[in-house]
Amino acid sequence: METAWDHRFAQRTQRMQSSAIRELLKLVTEPDVISFAGGLPGPDVFPIKEFNQACTKVLIEEGSLALQYGTTEGYQPLREKIAEITSQYGIGVTADNILITSGSQQALDLLGKTFINPGDKILTEAPTYLGAIQAWNAYGADFVTVPSDDDGMITDALDHALRYGPKFIYVLPNFQNPSGTTLPLERRKQLVDLAERYGVPIVEDDPYGQLRYEGDHIPAVEVLDCRIRETNSCYSGNVIYLSTFSKTLAPGLRLAWVVAPPEVIRKMVLSKQGADLHTATFNQVVAYEVIKNGFLDEHIHLIRKVYRERRDAMLNSLAREMPAGVRWTHPQGGLFLWATLPEEIDTAQIFTEAIKEKVAFVPGASFFPCGGGHNTMRLNFSYSTTEQIEEGIGRLARVIRKFISIE
Amino acid sequence: METAWDHRFAQRTQRMQSSAIRELLKLVTEPDVISFAGGLPGPDVFPIKEFNQACTKVLIEEGSLALQYGTTEGYQPLREKIAEITSQYGIGVTADNILITSGSQQALDLLGKTFINPGDKILTEAPTYLGAIQAWNAYGADFVTVPSDDDGMITDALDHALRYGPKFIYVLPNFQNPSGTTLPLERRKQLVDLAERYGVPIVEDDPYGQLRYEGDHIPAVEVLDCRIRETNSCYSGNVIYLSTFSKTLAPGLRLAWVVAPPEVIRKMVLSKQGADLHTATFNQVVAYEVIKNGFLDEHIHLIRKVYRERRDAMLNSLAREMPAGVRWTHPQGGLFLWATLPEEIDTAQIFTEAIKEKVAFVPGASFFPCGGGHNTMRLNFSYSTTEQIEEGIGRLARVIRKFISIE
């Protein structure tokens, strides 16, 4: 049906592509598909009992507050609590540095709205988080990428990329989405050195930092940035740091946050006023009630235990089932690993066959804003049980073997 | 503290102004201020008991679903329920026409993202809803306005304004925010006739339509648009219709929706994917649980009763207290009324004095995207009790009397 709206879409609307991940998520609803496609937390680790208690307490004691409009910056006790948690990781900030967002996706959107003019260059890893590409495409960003290896961004290639004059560098140092890699300390230092030399600020996206299953915590890029600048403060302000409750509490709440200099927070608040006024008060008050007495630390122990088993099940199944020529990363944490097939294989074709065998993944090409990655795939290990992982990797290996033998 | 972010804000960021309403909302937190400034529902009509029951039921029976990621379009049973409610008002649509948004503000933002190129003209009433001005300013919209009187948009002036070639017409026909006026049937007909003649589509924003305290329901602009086009369908597709649960359930949930042709919904879904992935699953599932068996109709009766008393208290207090030269609208529903002072008075100056006397309102100028309205003010009557309204209007009248006697 033709309507008066049909020829009225904005130019930016033409640029928007449906997220492969979002479309793939719909497959998860078919119960017999084993999906390694989404970025879904395992529902068996949702703290349902604690949420139920918190909802009741909040509604009885503070219902008028929790159901009412709130301030754009976020619920003040939650901002203070997040500042406290952030400070435990060496980033010394107060509530004035915190903006609560409706999921990390909104943080990325507000960064685009606040900073990106059409044609601005944004420097990312390749591959990088699809949601960032989507969010910033809408504001007309161009991307400059730095290649990655098993240790994440190859910082030796950064100097060259910085000469394009990017507005900022976007990096996911811990258990990166999609690759599962972690940027080692030396590369983080090289990153902040080069960023400082070129005067380019950094967006550090850290949704999974607390979900480490082996190895030692590596200081945040922001912490290292402070050290090289020798500021008295322990927050330099040159790094905007993003994190979320989606992986540690539950994604269905849509609660995340931005850590930034107060002047940036003020501008992002204006962007957010126009975008959704504020993040749901109820969700913020309930989340605060759940975490205020230290529940998060205890709960993260449980998540780490469950996800570590799933990661190990996937690594073991891959080693057992995959034919020669398939390589994969060994993530020290997070939700994903990344497989690379022989150069001549197209994982988009494998995807079509895999779906017929009732197993799903995300073909890697979507994570490369400047092209490439046709022979790669992202595999999620947090959502499925160990039994499903073993069965699913078996199915996937059978499909891949057909392609490798054909070639 | 200077940071590397300071000189990197996008051009659109320079255009963004803090919403007067948002800033004023902060005053509400001072307990001795009687605030007619916000657009806050009365917290005494929040259905706290029903929410508590629904939260418990949802978490126990469907916790894994309610706390998980969801689809961008929205929770399917809620989309279907909203299609059913919409159809009761004569707009015949299915779930495919519904997009759930994170409050109506997000619906406005997504309309901007999907349709507005920098320099596009948007036709609005003057005064119009501040949130729409804010949302569309971020996309570089220019505004063309049509003046209003006590019956809303003066549609006789519409023909002239349409010659500017606006991308769409934005109108709030019922109990408009900020003015409280309602567009009569004849003007609605003239609006759809002219829109059809110029081939310009309409955004009909209807957050308050169900909150009518007197008079008969007037068919939606969309319904009249269908009639003149003599389509067989009862949804013509030329009007995008917006509504929300913020005024009938609770604003702290951030739940609203767009009714649009499926092709527009598909494009807006892409905009929303980049903006916040999806609206909080938990809120959608809980709201569905609360309303699925007809609670909304019953609850709206209560809200109407309470708000009608408050509106009457405000109208009576104004008649009793205000000096000659002050006029105000007589809203048949909604949350606001609109006062006009003598031409030589500036309500921004009155605001400063009123705050000292512990009473707040919104100076009217912010609601005029092309200037004007310096002698007007918006008064909210839903948030305060009848006693507070009487006391607050008394305080306000004393301040205004000083200004009128000085002049």
Image: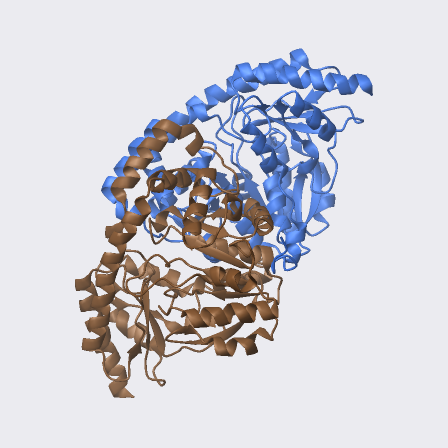
Chain colours: A blue, B brown
The residue shown at (28%, 62%) is: B213
> In the image, residue B80 lies at what x, y percent?
46, 42
- The quarter of the image holding the C terminus of chain B is bottom left
> In the image, residue A206 lies at what x, y percent?
53, 37
The residue shown at (42%, 38%) is: A253
> Quick check: can you spot residue B130?
yes
Viewer-side residue, A366 vs A207 = A366
Left or right of A102? Residue A51 is: left
Left or right of A251? Residue B231 is: right
Q: Residue furthest bottom?
A: B407
Viewer-side residue, A282 vs A324 = A282
Left or right of B345? Residue A213 is: right
The residue shown at (75%, 15%) is: A324
The residue shown at (39%, 30%) is: A296
Left or right of B239? Residue B364 is: left
Viewer-side residue, B110 vs A93 = B110
> In the image, residue A393 lies at what x, y percent?
63, 17
Q: Is residue A343 above or below residue A279?
A: above
> In the image, residue A373 lies at what x, y percent?
73, 33
Q: Quadrant of residue B319?
A: bottom left
> Quick check: can you spot residue A236?
no
Q: Quadrant of residue A60?
A: top left
Q: Residue furthest right?
A: A407
Q: Quadrant of residue A175?
A: top right
User: Number of marks in the image?
Assistant: 0
